[in-house]
Amino acid sequence: MKAIVRVAVVAVTLALFISALFNAILGLRDIAILLALATPLGLSAWGFSRAGHHEAAVVLLCTVLITVVTLTLVMNPLGVHDMAVTAYGGVVLVGALLLSRRAFYALAALTFLAATTAFAADLLGYSPSHIPAEDRWPQYVDFLVINTVFAILGRFASEKLFGSLHDAHHASWRDPVTGLLNRAGFLMSASMRLRTALGEGGQAVLIVADIDGFRRMNLVVGQQAADQLLAEAARRFSLACAGDCLIGRVGDDEFAALALGVREEHATALARLLHESLEFDHMGVSVRNAAGYARFPRDAHGIEPLMLAALGGVDHAKTEETDRLWGPADRI
């Protein structure tokens, strides 16, 4: 899906640039300037794609295209013509195939509003077109019919055959057992949050907890029951970490929590709270864990070294028989 979005970004950006040159050659200066100004906005969608926000990249790309098409139709000496049906229909079809349901509905509403505005400007004489207004109504009806068909068929294909981009993105970043972020999703989200916190001078604490004997649980109670235990552990872990907290299942039996805005002196108390949340009895099984934590930015500045520091605490905690929570401060 990432490749599809990036190809779309490159194609749209090149199309805007070539269209700007073409209109400049034809002497349509205003339209050429509009297309030239829109070209960098198309490129900005590349940044969203690189950060893993593929749906945001598609939304930005489609919004830019809708704005450009609408303004071009209003400024075009030919007025609103068949280009409206083709251009808007293409945007609607792309949105239907790639976007989540909510984002697609918003995009379809924006397309309808923009096209109606372009047609109204033409009918009311606010465009430079000299074509009679009565010739516009059949084209508006064509726009409504064709775009509705594109929306229905595209959405049907997306949901029934391919799955939406949002669902694919959700599946690639979410753990199917607990519903939490998986390791890739947690590391990506945590990295972005830590970069923001570092620029703002913020503090944070990363807590990693490793459930004891999870493989033995699988053998004793069965995989389905072990999954239920994991889901219960995830629920308790999430409830214990209130506020601005990012939760993930980063291993088969490992949970991680990145709590932002937590001062260094409060790190141990929060880590102990999360550690104790995974000490419970459920379905006749006693769940216990070893936990470690690391503080940002004192112990590390990035998510990878912060994770290594917290995992070092987990390894040390596993050797303890009583207090099975360990942090960087304990090793100084």
Image (spheres, grey):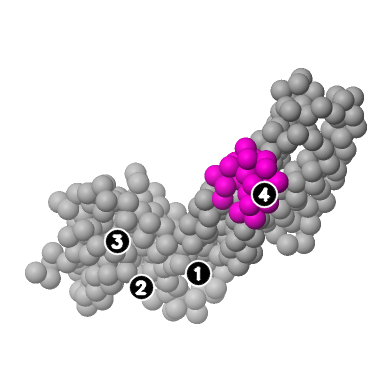
Circle 2: residue type: Asp
Which one is in front in this view, the residue at disc 2 or the one at disc 4?
4
Q: Residue 212 carries which label?
A: 2
Q: Counting other residues with Cα less than 10 Å from the Cα at mark 2, is it few (<14), some (14-19), or many (20 or more)?
A: some
Q: Separation of disc 2 and disc 4 at Cα?
A: 71 Å
The quadrant of the image that shows the N terminus is bottom right
Callout 1: SS: helix
Task: State the residue position of label 3.
Answer: 207
Task: State the residue position of label 1.
Answer: 226
Magenta residues span: 17-39
What residue appears at the point 44 percent right and 78 percent down from the top-left corner? 215
What residue appears at the point 71 percent right and 53 percent down from the top-left corner? 94
Q: Quick one: label 2 or label 4, which is nearer the N terminus?
A: 4
Q: Residue 25 carries which label?
A: 4
Callout 4: SS: helix
What residue appears at the point 39 percent right and 49 percent down from the top-left corner? 239
In front: 109, or 114?
114
